[in-house]
Image: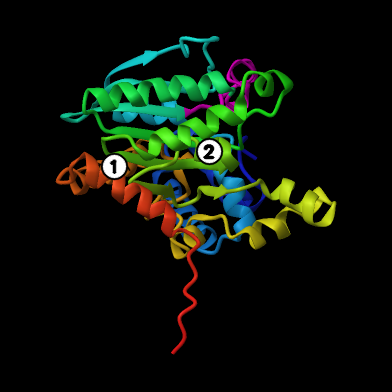
Amino acid sequence: MLEGWLDFEKPIADVEEEIEELRAIGGFADQIARLQGQADKLKQRIYANLTPWQRVQLARHPRRPYALDYIERMVQDWVEVHGDRNFGDDSAIVAGYGRIDAHRFAIIGTHRGRDTREKLARNFGMPHPEGYRKALRVMQTAGRFSMPVLTLVDTNGAFPGRGAEERGQAEAIARNLREMAVLPVPVIVVVIGEGGSGGALALAVGNRVLALENAMYSVITPEGCASILWHDGSRAEEAAATLKATSPDLLRFGIIDEVIPEPLGGAHSDWDAAAQLVKTTVLRCLAELAPLNADQLITQRIEKFRAMGFISTATA
């Protein structure tokens, strides 16, 4: 079977493997076309009936595009900045400036890393406090120069190590929450993979909060939830269903504003198409926010988050 496939994707992988073998031999155009049609039908059936746990697996898919993969496909004139002007640079967070079509943006994203060396260098996408302070530095600069902010969220949470705590992890997250709430420019958030706990929320206080179709966004990972509730991390699949952390549920509960569709087979199957879908949605959201002045943007953002979790007690 081809590498990088999840268990429930095995039927698709088997057909794709046959296609690759025929292409390597050459010819067999009719057989390849027939098998491609079969693969497309399998994708439509499998991805239309995903369980919450399968969506969690897709959010963590090893071939899923990460922040820099989207930036490479969406952004022109990208200039990355480094360091928090206090302690050091945190490679788990990438931050900088660039253009999406004619619009200048400040762009911040969490980046997990693709191979073992990069994963270690980027701490598996788990930021330290200096990463959040770097992100805030870029966002505040955007506020001074009237640039909209785009964040691309993909982390299972902030790094909980001793050094991070000693350098003020909780304070850095709390400061980002406070300062993002009052940025005088449009803030657009896209959860591109896994949005975990305060580590994700520290980059997600936006006027528009979007999530890809197979992303997840939760106060805790399913494994952590299962360990706390049932003292059994192996019940992560059950916890995933209980958390209601996948995009359809998040939209239904008003946690996110919109679900960005993914290409057939998931974002990992076509990075270019996934990036185009994100780009189109981000630019549309920017056009919707453009008429609002700074005070209106701040008010809309604060009221949006205050309204989350509201339950009416009115009676007939």
- Residue visible at 52% across and 12% down? 89
Q: Looking at the image, is 254 positioned above or below residue 72?
A: below
Which SS class for mark 1?
helix
Tell whether 138 sits left or right of 170: left
- Residue 98: x %, y % from top left: 27, 22
Image colouring: rainbow
| Residue 200, disc | 2
- Residue visible at 56% across and 50% down? 12
- Residue visible at 57% across and 55% down? 245
Q: Is residue 218 visible?
A: yes
Number of marks = 2
Residue stretch in magenta: 110-127
Tell whether 125 sits left or right of 265: right
The answer to which of 177 and 33 lies nearer the viewer is 177
| Residue 282, disc | 1
The answer to which of 20 and 301 lies nearer the viewer is 301
Report the quarter where the N terminus lies: top right
- Residue 30: x %, y % from top left: 40, 49
Q: Which amino acid is tagged 2?
A: Ala
Q: Is residue 57 magenta?
A: no
- Residue 20: x %, y % from top left: 51, 37
Q: Which amino acid is tagged 1?
A: Val
Q: Looking at the image, is 312 positioned above or below residue 300?
A: below
| Residue 43, disc | none
- Residue 268: x %, y % from top left: 48, 40
Q: How far apart are the alpha carbons under marks 1 and 2? A: 19 Å
Q: Is residue 60 visible?
A: no
**Disc 2: CA contacts within 10 A as few (<14), some (14-19) or many (>=20):** many
